[in-house]
Image (cartoon, rainbow, N blue to C red):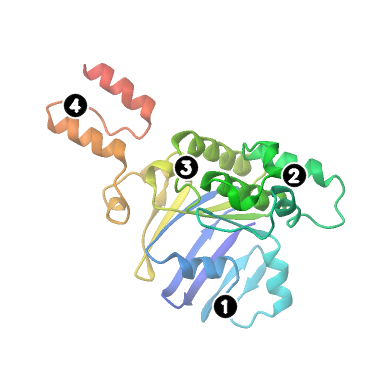
Amino acid sequence: MEIEFNDVSIDTLNNISFKALKGEILVLICDDKQAILDLLLLHQKPTNGSVLFDKEEFNKDSNSNTINEIKIKIGLIKNYTEKKFLTNSGQEELELYINPSTKEKDKKCLNALKLVNLSPTILERNTNSLSSIEKSKLSLACTLISNPSLIVLDNIEFGMNYGDKKNLKKLLIKLKERYKKTIIVISKDIDFLTLLVDNYLVINKGSICLSGTKKDFYNEKLYNYCAKPKIVEFIKYVNKKGHQIEEYTDLKELIKGIYRDV
């Protein structure tokens, strides 16, 4: 699914225009993400302009039938640190997102859990007793089981350890490359976004103030809107101490650079 914002205004957004292409990961760094989420999830109509979901247009005059047809193609994945699920077990929660007429529901549930690296024992456990990481992963599985064309991630990496983030990135790249999903990631964690981003936008005070591709993702201007990556801070620190290490963005390359310097 291709997403196109055409001079869209709503609440705190003013004449926003951008595209998210099929089979691409677009990163959004926003000071106010709620307005963007309301538009992507069709919770609120734009006051001006339109959003195209492939050829289907969402604007101030869109009727409920059009909105519902688009909504079923979109999946939201939030960080569920404090979220309570609608049911009492992982099995019941996953089945909420499966078409009632679907056969082999158990198989679909197991496949979804395997995708997000969750144990099948989650199916029998109480959803409200899960850890924050397990809740986030179950949320991801619930979204993927309905096979959406557009996947929107809202700070899902928050609270995850290095291994969880690494597995999540592998999954998102797989969804992009193998299944041609359109993925929009809302986050300010540059370390998490490394090697993930295809294109990025910074939306600040209602307007797009910065945009680019993965080639120029690491730059000083970007750090004005989110925390400077730890790897960059480390390199700048050791260079001040008299070393000469290039500004790597990959940890393995950094280790090689340190070795050469020593």
Residue at point 62% right, 40% down?
Answer: 116
- Disc 4 vs disc 2: which is toward the camera? 2
Mark 3 lies on residue: 160
Mark 2 lies on residue: 109
Q: Is residue 159 above or below residue 14?
A: above
The amino acid marked with disc number 4 is Gln
User: How far across and how far down the image is residue 262, in percent?
Assistant: 21, 16
- Disc 3 vs disc 4: which is toward the camera? 3
Pick whichever of labels 3 and 4 is earlier in the sequence: 3
Indicate which disc residue 244 carries. Answer: 4
The CA distance from mark 4 to mark 2 is 51 Å
Pick whichever of labels 4 and 1 is earlier in the sequence: 1
Indicate which disc residue 45 carries. Answer: 1
Instruction: Residue 241: tell me if it is visible.
Output: yes
The CA distance from mark 1 to mark 2 is 34 Å
Residue nearer the viewer, 126 or 45: 126
- Disc 1 vs disc 2: which is toward the camera? 2
Instruction: Residue 22: tell me if it is visible.
Output: no
The CA distance from mark 2 to mark 3 is 23 Å
